[in-house]
Image (cartoon, rainbow, N blue to C red):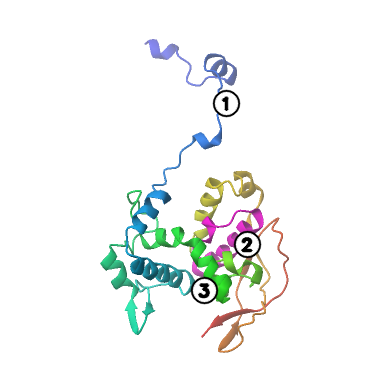
Amino acid sequence: MENFNKKQYLDSDFILKNIKIYDFPPTDLISADTYNEEMIMENFLKFSENDQVSLIKCAIHIAIIGYGNKTYGKIREGDKVIDIIDIFKRLNILFNKNINEKYDSGFISSRRLIRLLRYHISTFIEKTKRPSYLWFKYSDHDESKMNICFPGGEHLVDNHDDAVYLLNTYATLDVRQGTKFVERLTRVFIARQILPPQFFLQNVVKPVEKQIVTTPFKSSIKTTSMPFVQFIGSTSTTTTTSTTSTS
């Protein structure tokens, strides 16, 4: 009978009078992410130099060319053409795993490899001017953003404009492919404190006019149209542009 005399809900004054408010920074809240970059790098450096070079090539290939249907493609080493999956199997790199699957902190997966080697991928794009499939197929083809527009680039960008550019690019991919990459990027940018949670309350993705984006890669290119989406408040302009895709 004693419980019947207790209030089911308490007002704020009563709660705050009895339980004091303490100030602490947001950094005291620890993410459930099991990714530990220092441990992953230590395991990467245990490989021979030749194997490290092979894995760098693999990461660049996956980030720029892409992969699908459980096929990762091939890389060239001297006169040999080697299947990336064979390299992963030999070096015990995890692949073809669910995007939300959790591993031990130091385990190296194909996605973690791309994340670890993001600066190598960005440098390769800068030096060769070879864009990723993400930039080529789903962005508005801003050449100044080419070196940050690739899978894993969300862990590289360090400013609002680059983050919004990636959000718009992945939003276009989500519209076309029915995926939910923007949700993951939202979590990444909040966790990295690149964009505050309030940004995603004030800015929503909305479809805009089809765009035609000019591109310097004119040989063997078939021009197509694509839906383009834009975060409200983005600094990019909305114009009619051209899109391209390789045949």
Helix, strand or loop at disc 2?
helix
Q: CA distance from mark 3 to mark 1?
A: 45 Å
Q: Residues within 10 Å of mark 3 (few under 14, many from 20)?
A: some
| Residue 177 appears in the figure | yes
The one of 109 and 175 positioned closer to us in this rendering: 109
- Residue 186 position in % (x across, y down): 54, 52
Pick out the residue farthest to the bottom.
220
Q: Would residue 203 be found to the left or right of residue 38 on screen?
A: right
Q: Which residue is mark 3?
A: 133
The x and y percentages for residue 121 are 50, 67
Dot placed on the residue nearer the N-terminal end, 2 or 1: 1
Magenta span main SS: helix
Q: Quadrant of residue 241?
A: bottom right
What residue would you read off at disc 2? 165
Which image quadrant is residue 13 in? top right
Q: Mark 1 sits on what residue?
A: 23
Would you place residue 134 above or below residue 107 in this image?
A: below
Q: Quadrant of residue 112?
A: bottom left
Residue nearest the viewer, comparing 146 with 134: 146
Q: Magenta residues?
A: 150-178
Q: SS of the residue at dot 1? A: loop
Give the residue type that dot 1 points to. Answer: Asp
Separation of residues labelled 2 and 1 (CA atoms): 34 Å
- SS at badge 3: helix
Residue at point 67%, 79% (across, down): 214
Residue nearer the viewer, 10 or 24: 24
N-terminal label among 3 and 1: 1
Q: CA distance from mark 2 to mark 3?
A: 15 Å
